[in-house]
Image (cartoon, helix red, strand yellow):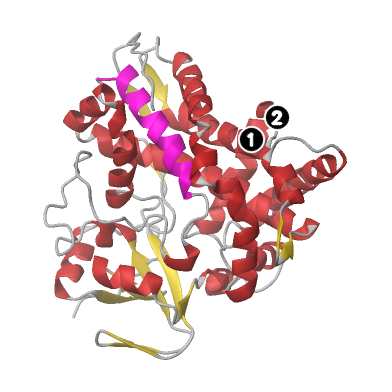
Amino acid sequence: MPARFDLSDPTFDVTAPQVHAAREDDWYVETNLGWAVLRYDEAQAILKDRRFIQGNAKWPAQNGIHSGLFSDWWAETLLSLEGEDHARLRTLLRPAFRNKTIAAMSPTFQKLAHELIDGFVERGEVELVSEFAEPYAARIICILLGLPEDDWPQVAHWADDLGKSFGVNVARDVPVIEAALTGLEGYVEAVIEDRAANPRDDLVTTLLQAHTDEGRLDRHELSVALVFLAFAGMETTRNQIGLALQTLLAHPDQWRLLGERADLGRQAVEEVMRVNPTVTWVTREAVEDVDFRGLHIPAGGIVQVISHAAGTDPSAMPDPAFDITQVRPPHLGFGAGVHHCLGHFVARVDMSVALPLLAARMPDARPDGPGEWLPVSGNTGPVRFPIRFTPGTRRDQDVS
């Protein structure tokens, strides 16, 4: 019988051989945070099974956090809400994240990516996180929300600290998280007040004015939603860009191909998220006793879908090797079912723009040392990722 995994251990790696070995033995394994789902078919089935809810509402309590600013805010986010409250908020927020709306922003994303690359391409070296991934992700969030782009360093700082909410060291980081939450909440509430008095063509105004048969967002709901969107959107995109380059640079032929064929940008995003997702496990909680494929999960039982193990499951992907030309079954990096990530179009479009441009302008890029990385459990990604390449390479490229 496989060993019990400790998902909270900062040294645990969800991509390790022991995880793959456990997947060969069975579709699940016990962990300190419930059962881990390791195979694709079972993972997809559980994520879409209405006998399970998101389960993230218990995350603070699972880490010994039972009260306080962070715990209270977490309970109100879209990630934690269920049932009618969750459906109503998604209905009100969804129009701002339509594929057509986000796709129309591709030229803006492309211009921003070129601007950032121009800042380091002549040097032949870049610290990817601070010089590209973070400003790119943060400035896009500012553009989407209608915030001054010059505010991106402060927004990014708050988002970085709030991102610790998803980390395995969350209990230790509560003071930092709550300080960032206070700062970002105050900033967002000032923006809401301004847009109420001075409407603009931006997302905050759209959400203030949005309503359906189910009503509209009140100011508090809008504040909670915008704070969550600002930090979750920035943090996940920044991390996923770093993970994408980690993967692509380990496959130089794929990196060169992406630089030559911008049309593979969208597929590259899907393939990277299949094999190296920033969200390494997706939580679900049983709302009733569930007997599922030989496993009894009592009401309140927690399951963790291990994204990498499911995405590289050979029973669902006969040839799971990394290949950006392949079309695969849908990966689980954005979740699935009623809690499928609301901002997935934003992430897909901004990364599908950025990755081909980076590959085109740094065709011989390679890591400059190991860098510094978050634990490969919980939400993962780079803290620092230095890269070297031949300086001055410029290949103008449009992404359509």
Q: Residue at x 35, y 14 (%)?
A: 124
- Residue bearing mark 2: 148
Q: For residue 372, what is the image quadrant?
A: top left
Q: Classify residue 145 by image quadrant.
A: top right
Instruction: Name which of mark 1 and mark 2 comes first in the sequence.
Output: 1
Asked if residue 107 is positioned above or below residue 26 in the image, the reply reads above
x and y percent of residue 231 in the render? 59, 47
What's drawn in magenta, residue-wise?
344-363
Q: Outermost residue, left direction?
A: 318
Disc 1 to disc 2, C-alpha distance: 6 Å
Identified by mark 1, the residue type is: Cys
Residue at the spot of label 1: 142
Please rate how many residues cluster around mark 1, counting C-alpha atoms within 10 Å: few if below 14, some from 14 to 19, many from 20: many
Q: Quadrant of the C terminus?
A: top left
Q: Residue at x 44, y 19 (%)?
A: 117
Type of amino acid at the residue the image marks with label 2: Pro
Looking at the image, which is closer to me, 80 or 342?
342
